[in-house]
Image (cartoon, rainbow, N blue to C red):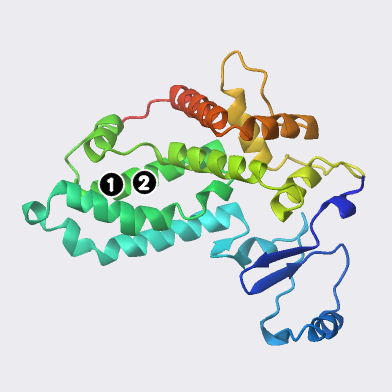
Amino acid sequence: MTLEKVLPREIAFADDVDFNAFQDIDIEEVGKVLEKYNLQVNVDKTEFTNLSRGETNWQTTKKVGTLIGDQEDIERRKQLSSAALVKLKNVWLKGDKITKNTKLKLYKALVKSVLTYNCGTWAPTQSQEERLNAFHRKQLKKVLNIKYPVKITNSSLYNKCNERPLSIVILESRWRLFGHILRRDSPIPANQAMSGYFVTEGSKFKGRPLTTLPVVLNRDLSRIINSNLQLKSSHDLEHLRSIAQQRDGWTKLTARIREAAEASQVPSEH
């Protein structure tokens, strides 16, 4: 089976549609076909994206509010959440006039939700996870108005805010999304893309391997002690798909992965 036959041809997002091809698409020809169904193509709003290892423009292409490039999207989420945090500056500075619990509820609803939007699609490296955790803690300190020279350990800060490292939140989101997709029908674009990932064609790329979502998912699994679960082939993918069909089993697996990730984190107190 070739990669061209496996990957989805169209991906629909509400009123937006992506057409995928291994060669250039003539948008005028597409428009002629759609006209038969009383549909029109807005040529001025049509974007052409070249997904290539040698190209970088695709990384800043936005789909459903998310940039395709993980690093680009993470940085954008940081900026957006920082802006949301600043807008509520007066709330954080009001001290006893607003309770800590109210401040934290506002933070989770109006700031953290912006930071973690669609984070289940990210494939962060371990260094990126550490930076995200540090960024999250910095925001929590601002919410509680904790400033130098006051010091607080990371664990105490998390306990005080009833929070967890952001990397754990992202991990859980990643596995919820993965399980949801695995339970869906095979023909949907997400499942087609996952199957296509393990189709090998031609020579391998030179240089350092990319940190892709399957790589991160496999890294999550590798932390579980005395487990043969992995995600390195289509066979592994189908095995995980069979587990995902039972929600209780998938929930237990996600819990094991989370516990293993929490146990593997290196304490860093500041």
Is 54 placed left or right of 140 in the picture? right
Secondary structure at numbered mark 1: helix
Determine the residue located farthest toward the top in the rendered image.
226
Disc on res. 109: none
Is residue 199 shown above or below 40? above
Above or below, comparing residue 18 to residue 148 in the picture: below
In screen coordinates, is 64 left or right of 259? right
Relative to 209, 166 lies left or right:
left
Q: Is residue 25 left or right of residue 270?
A: right
Q: Is residue 211 visible?
A: no
**Quarter of the image where one finds residue 218:** top right
Instruction: Mark 2 and mark 1 in contact? Answer it, CB < 8 Å.
Output: yes
Q: CA distance from mark 2 to mark 1?
A: 6 Å
Q: Name above or below for residue 210 compared with residue 16.
A: above
* Amino acid identity at mark 2: His
Expressed as whole percent of the image width and height from the top left, the position of residue 28 reads 83, 84
Q: What residue sits 46% from the left and 24% below the top?
A: 259
What residue would you read off at disc 2?
A: 136
